[in-house]
Image (tube, helix red, strand yellow):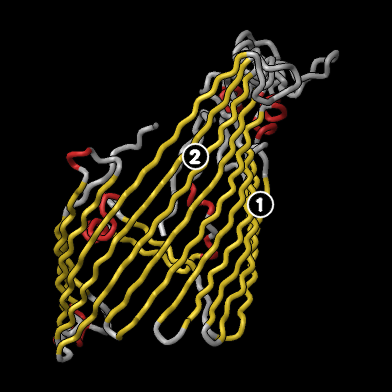
Amino acid sequence: MIIDNSADQQLNLGYRSNASNRLADLDPDDIERIEILKGAAAAALYGSRANNGVVQIFTKRGQLGAPQITVGTTATFSELFKRIDFAMTPKDLSGNPVTRYDPQDLIFRDTWSGDSNLSVAGGSGDTRYFVSANWVDQNGIMEGSNHQKLNFRMNLDQRMGTWFDLGVGANYIRTWNDLVINGENGTGGLLTSVVFTPTTLNLAERDPVTGLLKYPTNTFPNPLEVLENWHNGQEVSRFVGSLQAKANPVRALTLEYRMGYDRYEMETEQSIPRGSPNAPNGSATSLNRRNTLLNNDFVGALDLGMAETFRFTTSAGLNHTYQRLEQLNLSATDLTPGTRLVRGAVPGASEALIELVTLGVFAQQQIGWKDRRFLTAALRWDASSTFGVDERWQLYPKLSGSWVVSQESFFEPLTEWVTELRLRGALGFAGNQPPLSEA
């Protein structure tokens, strides 16, 4: 199945902020292995979606036998690796004695994070199962940065009769993130404020009358005010499901159908209260994204041998992918005092809808000789809604060959040092889809 792995930063967090890739929703403890397809082989099987190669992630599945329970937990200690070298001299430029303060002690912290996992795997008769749960609680070294994730997975395989297998999978993920605005977005932020604030100012000092933190300059906010009252939260709710049906009506013929469903809803909020030097009236932004990705694959393979010398493997298939992205942006300025919601006096809104449909058809023929020399030819046709009408269908041919040198008799004396040696070569065409456009 195909899952979304976008890494879009929905709201500007400023200085050296990194968007989280949606692959981070997966639990690494659920992964059995990872395989990489690239070049002509990837284009022949996945067409215009595989211009940069394909990462195949295989999750764990149950095995026949008594239930196996696995429990694991990891504790991680984090600290700031390198501090900024501020000028901490006891005198100013005029030679007058001054007291200096290092603001890094106020915004960075030493912290612990935890990652716990529980899984149960087993099977009996015609049924195999794998069930897991995962809880992640990460605290960033910067005050106000936190990440929590809850993950549940279930993989079930059922043998039905002597020639039909059915497999289903479900994965639910929920994440909560507290992010920090670091500056360079027109409002200052945390790190930018720290860097441009003189060390002679005590950022923790409060107004004796109001009890509020003082703004050290007329340009940047107090970094502690950013931590206390500025808000940037993100929540993601995601469900990933799969269905696989495999039939072997005759020994040489395999028919397989796969369906994948990936849907997530992401809510991101950012609010800056009234009073910031660069945003005196305050601002609030709310972003809601819904992304749905559905793929259907049908593949047939015929495997024929000839006198234990030649082996002919013929495969053909059809791939269909549908993606729908809905996004709603709401923003407001001139906030009502004491609120951080999008109900200010100067509101704004934008909405986007993107749909993408891809249809692919492929055929491949492989000829093997004594399981050591292989010749493969494949054709892949792709049609996409992002292609122009005159260029709707794209063709990706491939020709490849490989030689397992370590299977030859003359290689036997070298197997003590080299267990396997294979030479490969391939020639093919690759391409990609143009950027999505909003409707």
| Of callouts 1 and 2, the N-terminal one | 2
Location of the C terminus (image quadrant): top left
Q: Which mark is residue 137?
A: 1
Q: Residue at x 63, y 45 (%)?
A: 176
Crowd class of label 1 (few under 14; some 14 to 19; many from 20; radius 10 Å): some
Task: Tell me what residue is drawn at x 46 percent, y 38 percent.
Answer: 8
Q: Is residue 145 above or below residue 13?
A: below
Side of 74 where 353 appears, left or right? left
x and y percent of residue 64 in the render?
53, 84
Residue type, mark 2 in image: Ala
Identify the residue at horizontal 60%, vertical 41% (top origin).
80
Image height of 82 relative to 331, above or below: below
Q: Secondary structure at mark 2?
A: loop
Visible residue check, residue 345:
yes
- Viewer-nearest residue: 198 or 95: 198
Residue 385 place in picture, x, y as percent: 30, 42
Q: Nearer the viewer, residue 277 or 354?
A: 354
Q: Report whether 38 appears left or right of 344.
A: left
Rate crowding at label 2 as few (under 14), some (14 to 19) or many (20 or more) other CA atoms within 10 Å: some
User: Is 56 placed above or below 287 here?
Assistant: below
Residue 119: x and y in percent read 61, 70
Rendering quarter of residue 362: bottom left
Q: Which residue is mark 2?
A: 19
